């Protein structure tokens, strides 16, 4: 399988087009993600059939234990993950082209969990990390996500075809809160400018401080804005009230879904329900693009006691829970792997 030559603009464009337009596409498999993660190494493998790319594996590398590299394919590969032989070939081609001190190639495709698929990967020589991991942050990416399906999956769900049916999809109190935000004068804009990122970052750091969690530096988001500005695949949504931004969200449009990736809010204005207004506009964005899924991101568990689940579930309470296959680990150096896993225990 070929390694992508980043100096071949035509092939890079074909690679990106596949990642962006294939229904399974993910922003974290776009070579631009490698530029965003500018302190990581990168390697891009692809498979072709009849001269067209039909599978890719984008791998980023970083030192994760002293002197040894983790090779991570975030939400990858973009391929028929049921075709275990193909995925194994992609991984082995990556291994042949990665530095000798890589101890692990980790995949975590957005593929529903099944006992059969888990066993198939184990039989092929992978170590899998899914249902035995009980903590949300026991995996790099959360394995349990809340997803709204525009095509009407789940008990009581109908196909979402317009804004009325989208609004009807939510819980009643969520509909009321969206309307309350509008009545109070909350308005939402969207864009991809540096100013949009700066306004987002203010609410993002407010939220991080109130929840006592760490956050990424502004340079990370400014680099994101510079890389994706004008592509149409990236938007910043800002909720305004009385001349200030009080809530925000960042989303990516790849494949058949919108991925709601980052958010912020000013709790001093919580009574105006601006985060609900942001979600409403982001969900309408997905509807306007004909998306199949809107991914709200991970939750600790499918339980109302989990705060993330409680907020996200009200928008997607008809929808089946999304439980993914988890991490498919191709272990090259067992000692390095064992050392690496200690941080997740």
Image: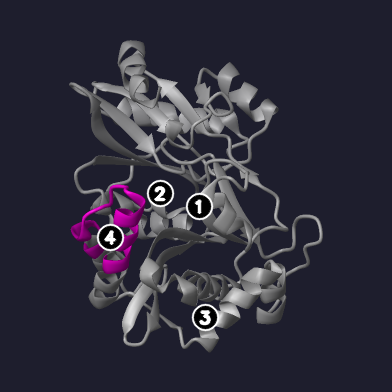
Q: Which residue is mark 4?
A: 205
The answer to whether any part of residue 139 appears in the image is: no
> Against 16, is 229 above or below?
below
Instruction: State the separation of the CA atoms marked 1 and 4.
Output: 19 Å
Q: What kind of element bears circle 4? A: helix
Q: How many marks?
A: 4
Where residue 295 appears, as percent x and y from the top left, is 54, 57
> For the residues carrying marks 2 and 1, which lies nearer the camera in this image?
1
Residue bearing the label numbered 2: 29
Residue ID for mark 3: 181
Tell me the crowding category of disc 2: few under 14, some 14 to 19, or many 20 or more residues within 10 angstroms, Cα based.
many
Foreground label between 1 and 4 = 4
Give the residue drawn at x 36%, y 31%: 94
Whichever of callouts 3 and 2 sits on the residue coming sooner in the sequence is: 2
| Structural crowding at the residue carrying mark 3, measured as other residues with C-alpha within 10 Å and reported as few (<14), some (14–19) or many (≥20) | many
Q: In the structure shown, which secondary structural element does the residue marked by tag 1 occupy?
A: strand
Q: CA distance from mark 4 to mark 3?
A: 22 Å
- Mark 2 or mark 1, which has the lower sequence index? 2
Q: Is residue 85 visible?
A: yes
Residue sitting farthest toward the top: 335
For the residue pair 145 and 112, the one nearer the viewer reads as 145
* Above or below, comparing residue 323 to residue 8 in the picture: above
The residue tagged 1 is 297
């Amino acid at each position: 399988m070929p390694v992508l030559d980043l100096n071949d603009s035509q092939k890079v464009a074909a690679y990106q087009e596949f990642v962006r337009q294939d229904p399974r596409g993910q922003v974290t498999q776009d070579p631009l993600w490698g530029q965003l993660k500018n302190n990581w190494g990168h390697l891009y493998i692809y498979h072709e059939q009849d001269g067209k790319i039909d599978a890719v594996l984008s791998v980023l590398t970083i030192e994760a234990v002293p002197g040894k590299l983790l090779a991570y394919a975030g939400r990858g590969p973009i391929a028929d993950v049921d075709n275990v032989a193909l995925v194994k070939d992609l991984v082995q081609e990556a291994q042949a082209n990665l530095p000798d001190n890589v101890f692990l190639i980790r995949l975590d495709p957005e593929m529903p969990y099944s006992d059969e698929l888990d066993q198939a990967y184990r039989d092929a020589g992978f170590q899998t990390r899914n249902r035995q991991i009980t903590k949300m942050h026991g995996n790099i990416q959360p394995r349990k996500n809340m997803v709204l399906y525009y095509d009407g999956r789940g008990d009581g769900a109908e196909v979402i075809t317009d804004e009325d049916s989208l609004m009807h999809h939510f819980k009643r109190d969520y509909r009321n809160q969206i309307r309350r935000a509008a009545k109070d004068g909350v308005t939402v804009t969207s864009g991809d400018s540096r100013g949009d990122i700066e306004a987002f970052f203010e609410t993002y750091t407010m939220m991080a401080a109130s929840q006592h969690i760490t956050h990424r530096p502004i340079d990370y988001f400014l680099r994101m804005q510079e890389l994706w500005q004008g592509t149409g695949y990236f938007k910043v949504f800002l909720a305004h009230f009385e001349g200030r931004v009080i809530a925000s969200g960042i989303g990516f449009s790849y494949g058949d879904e919108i991925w709601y990736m980052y958010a912020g809010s000013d709790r001093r204005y919580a009574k105006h329900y601006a985060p609900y207004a942001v979600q409403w506009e982001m969900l309408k964005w997905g509807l306007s693009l004909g998306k199949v899924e809107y991914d709200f991101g991970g939750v600790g568990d499918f339980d109302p006691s989990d705060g993330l689940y409680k907020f996200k579930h009200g928008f997607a309470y008809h929808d089946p829970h999304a439980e993914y296959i988890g991490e498919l680990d191709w272990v090259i150096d067992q000692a390095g792997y064992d050392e690496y896993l200690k941080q997740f225990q």
